[in-house]
Image (cartoon, helix red, strand yellow):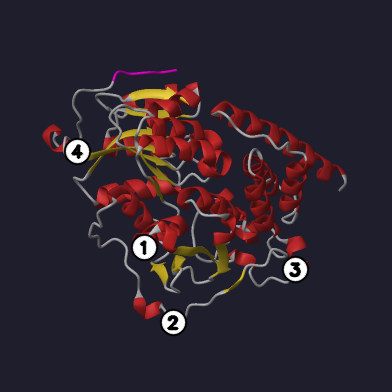
Amino acid sequence: MTEEGSREEREGGVKAPQQKETMKKIAILGSTGSIGRQTLAVVEALAGQFCVVGLAAGSNLEELIGQIERHRPEVVSVATAERADTLAKRLREKGVASLPAIHHGREGMLAVGTHASAEIVVSAAVGVVGLEATYEAVKLGKTIALSNKEVLVAAGELVMAAVEKSGKELLPVDSEHNAVHQCLRGGKHGEVLRIVLTASGGPFRKTPLKDLEHVTTEQALAHPNWRMGNRITIDSATMMNKGFEVIEARWLFGMKPEQIEVVIHPQSTIHSMVEYVDGSVLAQLGPTDMRMPIQYALTYPARVKTAEVQLDWGKLKRLDFEKASTRRFPCLRLAREAMKKGGAWPCALNAADEVGVAAFLDGKLKFLEIAEVVERVLERTARVKFGSMEDVLAADLEARRVAGEEVGKIESRK
């Protein structure tokens, strides 16, 4: 590990120390990913309101170096010790006078997520890599702006118990859950009949079922509405992403499984809806721009004026809705089954999907075989209840091992 002492002063065009005392201090897990970069765009657009004290990244040093130069965090983390050494060297070569504390790996992610001065932790790391750090941040009473789906899919019961104990609210960044959060401000919990999560339907909403057998990675990555990372884009094509969101909604909003529905809404203008017992339906509309829900989470409970994101009413011609078919999207069915069984099943669902998607992107699996791998892993998953984060991480590793076996079996029959 490479570690440099944190500095007393910040330099290079940032706000004066006396101003920083009034700013909200944030740390970002996954700062070089799509959500991390857009979070920093929001911070820069709302100049003077936030101070970035921690950044955790993986391997994208070029992006991270630029972020460090602009925001001068106190602590950063990268994937490996080698990259930590390279980062320190590169920063010195660029003439950065006072380096942040540089960490790596699991310890580094924890260092950023639990950094003493961080008031808000943006959990945007992809995969279970950010799970433990987010959980520890919750236990420390930090406000969490949650984008990482694995946190609640894999360990929802543990995390939400810690959230309740902390007395802080977990604020969703995903556009669908963020929309539900906003709509729930219009009534009491007991007045909610159901939550309706909208889904674009991805690139294969109208593709004949027989043609799904021959889907290419390029076709699956061509999402019609959103620009996202590879895994979440494939999960949107299979609708596993929406299945994850159903599980998340169950934990975030304390709803029963039967109170959470999914509808296809190809325009992605209505991000989600809440139906109340009196028949009223509140819907949240907005452009397909993640800066809007990110800003909402960072500034909650206030709404802060911005010129960065606006809905173009002139282009809004129609709003269509249709039923989500589990025949076309078997991953949606598998997610609901995992949610109902609970315990290790949702964790295994996520792990198996991550392995399956990676195998598809590597050309080892066909598109429809992703769901096949997930179903086989769930069939081999024991029904155990988690008592600790160590149980969650162990179940995740086992599900990945089993998923690897299943991928190998499918490859061998070709």
Q: Which residues are magenta?
A: 1-5
Place of residue 192 in the rendered image (x, y in percent of width and height, measured from the top left) = 45, 63
Q: CA distance from mark 3 to mark 2?
A: 29 Å
The three-letter amino acid code for the residue at tag 2 is Lys
Q: In the image, is residue 371 part of the stretch drawn in magenta?
A: no
Residue 14 is labelled as: 4
Q: Position of residue 51 (x, y in %)?
A: 25, 38
Q: Which label's residue is closer to the chain start, 4 or 3?
A: 4
Q: Earlier in the sequence, mark 3 or mark 1?
A: 1
Q: Which residue is pictured at 74% across the width and 42% down the height? A: 377
Counting labels gives 4
* Residue at x 67% of width, y 67% of height: 325
**Dot 1 alpha-carbon crowd within 10 angstroms: few under 14, some 14 to 19, many 20 or more:** few
Query: In the image, is residue 155 above or below residue 225?
Result: above
Name the residue carrying label 1.
187
Q: Indicate which label's residue lies in the foreground, 2 or 4.
A: 2
Q: Which label lies toward us, 3 or 1? A: 1
The residue under label 2 is 317
Residue in the foreground of this view, choosing between 345 and 353:
345
Residue labelled with disc 3? 209
Q: Secondary structure at mark 1?
A: loop
User: In whole angstroms, how far apart are the C-alphas of marks 2 and 4?
Assistant: 44 Å
Residue type at mark 3 is Leu
Residue 265 visible somewhere in the drawing: yes
Outermost residue toward the left? Answer: 18
Q: Earlier in the sequence, mark 4 or mark 1?
A: 4
Neighbour class for label 3 at 10 Å: few (<14), some, many (≥20)? few
Residue type at mark 4: give it: Val
